[in-house]
Image: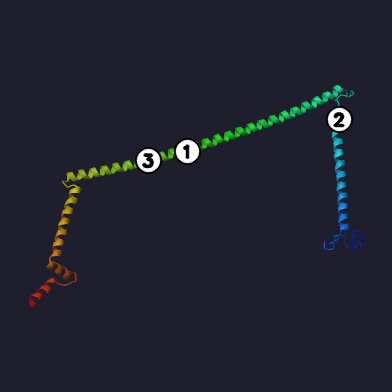
Amino acid sequence: MTPEHTFHPNISTEIPEIHIINSKKYKELKEKKRIEQYREEQKMIELKEKKAKQNKLFIERLKLQPTNTYKETRSSILRNRAKKEKNEIENLYNEIESEVLQDKEQKQLKMKNYIQNKLKDLNYRNYTYDKDIKGRNMNRRKEQELLEERYKEKLESMNNDINNKRTYLFEQNYEIKKEQNREKEQKELSNKNPIDKFNKIIETNGLDIDEINLKIQLHY
């Protein structure tokens, strides 16, 4: 199969990738076709560019023509050029002025937002600090009130004790400790005595001391 091969009308002219012949001639033909296509495309682009340039020149010439019907003199051409330059400069000035104004507005907005955020932060801090201080003062007042109430209760109890001719708490505690010490001493003495020890053992085992004493006497 060669590139010049004629196909049946019912068969597609597209050669499958498997049957493409990778010969030098076939590749050269392909490259030639590509080069021709590229050249044609370049020619079309150049023609379009030429047309665009011609149209531009035509439009510029129309613009340069005077508004009145008198002949195009040197002064009229210069006047039209001056008008054109003036319009261009005015447009540039307006664009630059608008950009400068936009920049100023953006800077002002940034400053405004920064100041607003700063004020919000400061107000929030002030609010939190005031809240903390108020809370601490309230807690201190409550603690002070509780202490005062306890102090009053103690004073009242002491006054009641004095009126009723009672001893103070520290004296009562001292007397109770005295009695407890006496009981401890008695217990220690009883533990040292062997008879008391024997009696305790019997009591803990659930026996009767009198019966055991009788048995001991009968035995002797």
Secondary element under disc 2, as helix, strand or loop, is helix
On residue 61, the disc is 2
Q: What residue type is labelled 1?
A: Arg
Mark 1 residue crowding within 10 angstroms, few (<14) / some (14–19) / many (20+): few
Q: Nearer the viewer, mark 3 or mark 1?
A: 1
Considering only order in the chain, which callout, 2 or 1, is on the residue closer to the N terminus? 2
On residue 138, the disc is 3
Q: Which of marks 1 and 2 is in front?
A: 2
Secondary element under disc 3, as helix, strand or loop, is helix
Q: What residue type is labelled 2?
A: Arg
Q: Which residue appears farthest toward the top when viewing the image?
A: 75
Residue placed under numbered mark 1 in the picture: 125
| Residue at 15% over, 64% down | 191
Spot occupied by residue 14 in the image (x, y as percentages of width and height): 86, 60
Mark 2 residue crowding within 10 angstroms, few (<14) / some (14–19) / many (20+): few
- Whether 153 is drawn above or below 1: the answer is above
Contact, mark 3 vs mark 1 (Cβ under 8 Å) = no
Seen from the viewer's position, the closer of residues 32 and 220 is 32
Considering only order in the chain, which callout, 2 or 3, is on the residue closer to the N terminus? 2
